[in-house]
Amino acid sequence: MIFCLADKKDALQIAQIHKNEIDKGFLSSLDIIFLGNFYGALIESKFSFCIVAKEDDRIVGFISGVFDLDKFYRYFLKNYFFQSVVLLCKKVFNISYIKKILETLLYPVKEKNLPPAELLTMAVLKQFQGQGIAGKMFFEFLGEMKKRDIKTFKVLVGEELKSAIAFYEKNGFTFLKNTTIHNRKSSRIYLYDIK
């Protein structure tokens, strides 16, 4: 098993793992090509990164983060806006989707007193879960944050994602507060201070 920074060619495979393993949440409800663009942007932007766990050139897990969520969203909109509109055109006329898109983009503004750095997503294929892969990816994630001199970052996790909450609490995240996003769904915000 190797752990390394993702390459742009990995984006679609990462998107597929996201769609399969993170079945709840707004991003998971979107088209696989849109998700591929999202992860492509995370991989290529200087404001973000994605680490993958590979076994025999197959991606079995990933963890992604941003150094500044607001700057990453601006990068994504500048470079992927038109592609995204085309991919979302069926959903873009649905009022609830427009509202969710706006909530996602405005989340950094709503929580402006929080650190700009964030752990965005993490997933491991079901058949590889329980082998310590998530913990090893998180260790690599911390290394990337340290390289950029990030001292504190946040994670937003849905209240219904009990195993994710357990992982974060076990690994030293501190609960900060509850918030609501996407149809008033309750989520928790955790902070992590890098020692």
Image (cartoon, rainbow, N blue to C red):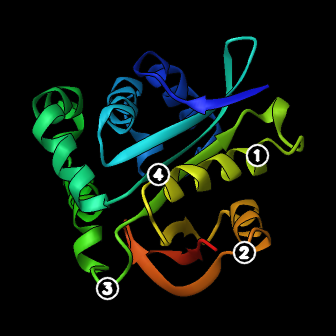
Q: Residue at x 28, y 70 (%)?
A: 108
Left or right: 55 as drawn, with respect to 98: right
- In the rendered structure, which amino acid carries the disc numbered 3? Asn
User: Which is nearer the N-term, disc 4 or disc 1?
Assistant: 4
- In the rendered structure, which amino acid carries the disc numbered 4? Gly
Q: CA distance from mark 4 to mark 1?
A: 15 Å
Task: Say which element carries label 2.
Answer: loop
- Name, please, the residue furthest toward the right: 131
- In the rendered structure, which amino acid carries the disc numbered 1? Lys
What crowding class fits label 3: few (fewer than 14 Cα within 10 Å), some (14-19), or many (20 or more)? few
Percent x, y for residue 90?
Answer: 21, 32
User: Could you say which is closer to the camera, residue 128 or residue 180?
Assistant: 128
Q: CA distance from mark 2 to mark 4?
A: 17 Å
* Label at residue 136: 1
User: Which is nearer the N-term, disc 2 or disc 4?
Assistant: 4
* Label at residue 113: 3
Q: Residue at x 66, y 75 (%)?
A: 173
User: Tags 3 and 4 in contact by the CB under 8 Å rule?
Assistant: no
